[in-house]
Image (cartoon, grey):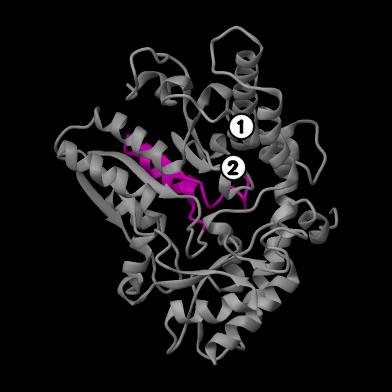
Amino acid sequence: MQRYDVHQIRSRYPALSEGGLLDGAVDLDGPAGTQVPASVVEAMAEVHRRGIGNLGGGFPPSDAAEEITAAARSAVADLFNAGPDEIAFGQNMTSLTFAVSRALARTWEPGDEVVVTLLDHDANVAPWRLAAADRGVTVRTVPFDPSTGVLDPADVAAVVGPRTRLVAVTHASNVLGTIPDVAAIVRIAHDAGALAYVDAVHYTPHGIVDVAALDCDFLVASAYKFYGPHIGALYGKAELLEALDAYKVVPAPDEGPEKWETGTQSFESLAGVRAAVDHLASLAGGATRRDRITASQGIVRDHESALIGRFLEGARSIPGLRVYGITDPDMLHRRAPTFSVGLEGVAPQDAVAVMRPLGINVRSGHHYAVGVMGHLGLLEGGGLIRVGFVQYTSPEDVDRTLEALASAAG
């Protein structure tokens, strides 16, 4: 196994280097958005340095836009193990999910049902609730085990029935780090004749996304969570993207993923997406970019697993500190390196106020996962402190974080 040199990885990120806003700080806000490597910065700048036009002009700047779009589609297809014709882009995961929810809702009838979970970010809940309300459709909600953060596929199966039209589920919780058995949940949906919509925003920087293996119908991610720019990417099975009626302007294409891309795209962001995927693939060799992504993400996962163990071991020695979610050593493969913690007798916002002057960038609150916080009984009390490790997090960062949490605990 190739040795993971986290300090070499960190050197790729201008924001973490001398002169950057994060020079000397511990950036634990990756779940809200990661920093970007220099290769992404350069790819985006090069678009405007060379010049860019809009699609369909037939002259060099327009041709460049066509090439950038195709390259980004190909890169994300490799990231998801999909076809380029199954990838569409939008402002972010939330806007893409609202677009798909409205299109799917056109096919629903009163008495139909959709299934959401309490483990999900609200971006994979609210669009479905609103679409269901518009169509007189029932929403069924699946809880998770509050003591472990685990979402049991059996609990999903218990609410899925013959009128279920869609099951929406997260690939990894952005608060508790839980990685559900998504493949099993997709099978449950399909066995009932329903579609499966997967939110992979939080999973993508930490795992290997494989829509073919999951057999999901849709999957969404946001590049700014996997070291890229602020833009979202949608996978949809080609036959579904073609069959559904998208909400779009009349001159927009009627076929292909373009019909889901409302208005002019951010071509500089698309260039950044391709660079971000290439960055994800840069830690290992392989015959194809997909091979390199798979091998590289495996290396990162080993690094992050070591950080998970280091954090949990240190957390046990801090009086009054509670780590929510999976902590069982035999279950750590079912969690991402994201922790939400609370300190007995200390309000989350007060703890954060102690940690920030120590150079620890964390935030407190519900983190847009209102279902999680409500189910844990923490929504009205300020939520939890979230600690997120990513590929550029070092063991020293973990130690500094534990020291800051100890200081906040008093």
Q: Is residue 43 left or right of residue 157?
A: right
* Mark 2, secondary structure of its residue: loop
Q: Which mark is residue 335?
A: none
Badge 2 is on which residue?
Answer: 229
Residue nearest the viewer, comparing 277 with 262:
262
Q: Seen in the image, is 372 located left or right of residue 19?
A: left
Q: Is residue 368 magenta?
A: no
Which residue is label 1 attached to? Answer: 268
User: Which segment did they paint magenta?
Assistant: 179-208
Q: Amino acid at mark 2?
A: Pro
Is 98 rendered above or below residue 317? above
Depth check: give the residue in front, 194 or 6: 6
Marks 1 & 2, CB-CB < 8 Å contact: yes
- Label 2 environment density (alpha carbons within 10 Å; few <14, some 14–19, many ≥20): many
Q: In the image, 77: left or right of 198?
A: right
- Sequence order check, earlier mark of 1 and 2: 2
Query: Measuring 25% from the left and 28% from the top, which residue is drawn there?
Result: 107
Residue 126 x, y percent position in the rendering: 30, 48
Q: Is residue 161 visible?
A: no
Question: Can you say whether 56 is above or below 101 in the image?
Answer: above
* Quadrant occupied by the N terminus: bottom right
Magenta stretch: includes residue 202: yes
Residue 88: x and y, percent? Answer: 49, 28
Instruction: Give the image location of residue 192, x and y in percent.
Output: 32, 38
